[in-house]
Structures are given as structure tokens and as C-alpha cells.
Image: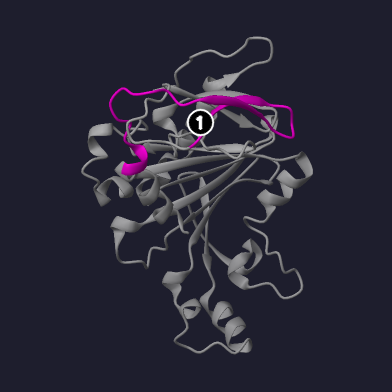
């Protein structure tokens, strides 16, 4: 299921709408492999079920208390090693309940998501490198590597890398693809935008709908960065018009994690997020 399909499913009123007061869900505790213990509601759910304003989520060993209206799935069914948020763009505020019903595709186009995933340091670095390095090192597809893309321009403090369509077409012809295959079309290959640390190492990878794409309403960017101090990979998805704000979005992703984090020895609290 692609991201837009997931957003449509998660934002549909049947899932998001918290109905009138009713019985609270029964709760139990759940402990993940990293020792993080959280309270979780027990299914099944009913449309009139009243849910608490906050949800406990685990990000590896870290416990967080997240406002339910920030969650991608307000039922709080995280995997235990991460969680996802869904906010309105460009306001970066929770999507108002009044705009969820009647459901509008416009809301999907305005929705941005923040996905947080914890991993041990070795696996974390591999996950991040895969964003710009091909898995097949013997015969890599040229659009999957920075080394075989065309460095195009610099904007917003990012360096653009565009698919080299001559190399792409030659590669797939050699594999037997027909000229009319989708992979031969430039609009099938995202434009990449790269930020680097002072030492030259890649710090952020942003992949956006290519400029040759005609329907700007559906243009999106997939933005990946590391929060190394928390062993966390963050993926942000937003309309392409937000590319110029990439630094602010990274700062907001970090601020939300830190605002919702329950530090050891402080217990669970009801802190709200920034904004």
C-alpha cells in the first residue's frame, strides 16, 4: 500500500472520528524487546468508544506520551519500535476533527506524516545508506545511486541529483525492457535533494516528485534523516511545496519527539506537543 493510500485509510472518518462519550477501552501493558513498557487499549473498538487524549508509544527503549490527535492512527496501534504522526501542512497542527467528516481528498493532499523508527546503531546506518546507495552493488540500477545521477543544482541549501535517463534507459534495455516501459519515462524517477554534514557525509535525503510531473496537486517529497542520539530514523512525507522548509521540518520532527518523551525516573505525564 503506497503512502497516499495509507493516508486515505487512516484519515477516513470510520477510523479517526472519536464519537460521543462511551465506555473507555480496557487497557493492558505491553513491553517490547528493548524493555519499554506502555499501556495499550484492548480491541475490539466501537465507534462510540471514548479514548484518552494521549497514547503511550514506544520508540525502542524510550517511552513517549503522544497526543492522540497527532497520531497517524489515533487508536495508537504502534509496533513498539516506532510510531507515526499525521499533521496538517503547512500549519503543522493536528488535523481538525471537523475537517475529517465529510472526508475530503484535499485533506489527503495537505497531510504530512512523520514516521519514527528505532534501530541499533549498525542497522540504523545501513537503513540510512540504502536511501542513496543501491542494494545490488554488482549491477546497480543507475537511478538508485548518487554516483550515477546527474548533479544538477543547489537550492535551499540542498544539492539536486537528477536521474540520468540515458544511463537508465541503457540499463533497462540491457535487461530486456521495452521502450514503452514505465521505468523508461523520466516522470517515473524522483528528483533527489541531498544535505551533507561539514565533513561531507550525507545528513538528509529528500526524494521528490520530478519536475517533469504535470499534476502539482499530487507532488510529494519523502524526506529521511537520522536522529543518531536516539538511534532513530525519521521519515517525513509532505507536499513538494514544503521543500524550501526542510530545515524547519527536521527541527519540528526532533522537537516533537523530545516534547513527547518520558525521561527515565520522571514517570508518565500529559505533556502536549509543540505548536
| Coordinates of residue 227 in the picture (x, y in percent) | 63, 35
Identity of the residue drawn at 37% across and 25% down:
50
Identity of the residue drawn at 41% across and 25% down:
51
Identity of the residue drawn at 64% across and 37% down:
81
Dividing the picture into quadrants, the one containing residue 21 is: top left
Q: Does residue 43 appear in the picture of this structure?
A: yes
Q: Does residue 88 appear in the picture of this structure?
A: no
As drawn, 97 above or below 1: above
Q: Nearer the viewer, residue 79 or 155?
A: 79
Residue stretch in magenta? 14-43
The local crowd at label 1, few if under 14, some if 14 to 19, many if 20 or more residues have their Cα within 10 Å, is few
Circle 1 SS class: helix
Q: Is residue 1 left or right of residue 50?
A: right
Identity of the residue drawn at 31% across and 49% down:
109
As drawn, 21 above or below 179: above
Q: Which residue is mark 1?
A: 251
Q: Is residue 66 left or right of residue 9?
A: right
Q: Is residue 42 magenta?
A: yes
Quadrant assignment for the C terminus: top left
Q: Nearer the viewer, residue 98 or 38?
A: 38
Q: Nearer the viewer, residue 77 or 106?
A: 77
Q: Is residue 12 magenta?
A: no
| Coordinates of residue 236 in the picture (x, y in percent) | 49, 43
Q: Residue furthest top?
A: 266
Amino acid at each position: 500500500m503506497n503512502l497516499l493510500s495509507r493516508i486515505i485509510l487512516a484519515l477516513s472518518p470510520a477510523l479517526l472520528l472519536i464519537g460521543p462519550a462511551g465506555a473507555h477501552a480496557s487497557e493492558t501493558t505491553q513491553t517490547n524487546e528493548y524493555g519499554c513498557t506502555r499501556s495499550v487499549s484492548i480491541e475490539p473498538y466501537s465507534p462510540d468508544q471514548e479514548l484518552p487524549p494521549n497514547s503511550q508509544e514506544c520508540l525502542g527503549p524510550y517511552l513517549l506520551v503522544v497526543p492522540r490527535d497527532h497520531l497517524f492512527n489515533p487508536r495508537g496501534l504502534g509496533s513498539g519500535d516506532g510510531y507515526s504522526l499525521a499533521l496538517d501542512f503547512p500549519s503543522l497542527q493536528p488535523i481538525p476533527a471537523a475537517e475529517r467528516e465529510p472526508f475530503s481528498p484535499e485533506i489527503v493532499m495537505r497531510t504530512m506524516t512523520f514516521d519514527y523508527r528505532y534501530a541499533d546503531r549498525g542497522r540504523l546506518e545501513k537503513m540510512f545508506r540504502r536511501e542513496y546507495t543501491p542494494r545490488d552493488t554488482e549491477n546497480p540500477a543507475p537511478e538508485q545511486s548518487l554516483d550515477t545521477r546527474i548533479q544538477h543544482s543547489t537550492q535551499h541549501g540542498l544539492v539536486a541529483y537528477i536521474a540520468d535517463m540515458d544511463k537508465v534507459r541503457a540499463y533497462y534495455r540491457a535487461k530486456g525492457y521495452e521502450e514503452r516501459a514505465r521505468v523508461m519515462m523520466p516522470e517515473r524517477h524522483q528528483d533527489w535533494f541531498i544535505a551533507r554534514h561539514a565533513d561531507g557525509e550525507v545528513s538528509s535525503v529528500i526524494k521528490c516528485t520530478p519536475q517533469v510531473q504535470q499534476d502539482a496537486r499530487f507532488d510529494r517529497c519523502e524526506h529521511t534523516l537520522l536522529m543518531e542520539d536516539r538511534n532513530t530514523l525519521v521519515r517525513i512525507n509532505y507536499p513538494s511545496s514544503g521543500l524550501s522548509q526542510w530545515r524547519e521540518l527536521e527541527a519540528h520532527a526532533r522537537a516533537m519527539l523530545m516534547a513527547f518523551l518520558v525521561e527515565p525516573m520522571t514517570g508518565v505525564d500529559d505533556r502536549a506537543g509543540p505548536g
